[in-house]
Image (cartoon, grey):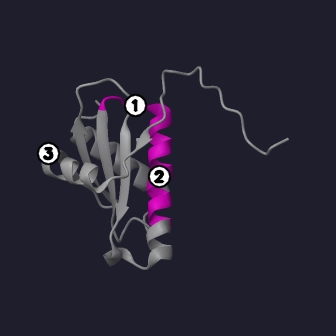
Amino acid sequence: MTGRVETDVSDSEHQRSIRLKKRSQFLALASKGRKAPMPGLVLQALRRDDDGAARVGFTVTKKVGNSVVRNRTRRRLREAMRMVERETSLQGVDLVLIGRDGTRRRVFTDLVDDLRRALRKTDVIA
């Protein structure tokens, strides 16, 4: 046994998002996308011309704290995104979640609610 968990990939209804990694992708989204600041995060969203899986990037500036704090903040944002993706189909959109100083102190359910509200505000979900 390899320790890996087998997942059923036949569930095409909820495609897993792809990560944005290049600086140019983040900059394009920042200049053209819609922005939704919330207490726990800032969301930038940009519609694409296809129905492919959502592309998601995460960023946390050094103002938030040292690398341990920034990584914890990023992990909380990733998990919040994972929770929302389970219940909502996100397709044809690029998203950037920006961690704030309040992200790490925010109650996790409130953080997930912030993300849902930001997605509605940017017209990603109804």
Task: Determine if the magenta segment contains residue 42.
Answer: no
Q: Of the residues under marks 1 and 3, which one precedes in the sequence? A: 3
Q: Nearer the viewer, residue 53 or 103?
A: 53
111 in relation to 6, above or below? below
Q: State the residue at coordinates (49%, 43%).
A: 82
Q: Name the amino acid, label 2.
A: Arg
Segment tinted magenta in the rendering: 72-92
43 relative to 94, above or below? below
Q: Which residue is mark 2?
A: 78
| Quadrant in the picture for the C terminus | top left
Element carrying mark 1: loop
Which labelled disc corresponds to residue 32? Answer: 3
User: Residue lying farthest right?
Assistant: 1
- Quadrant of the drawing holding the N terminus: top right
Q: Secondary structure at mark 3?
A: helix
Q: Which residue is mark 1?
A: 53
Q: Horizontal placement of 61 versus 87: left or right?
A: left
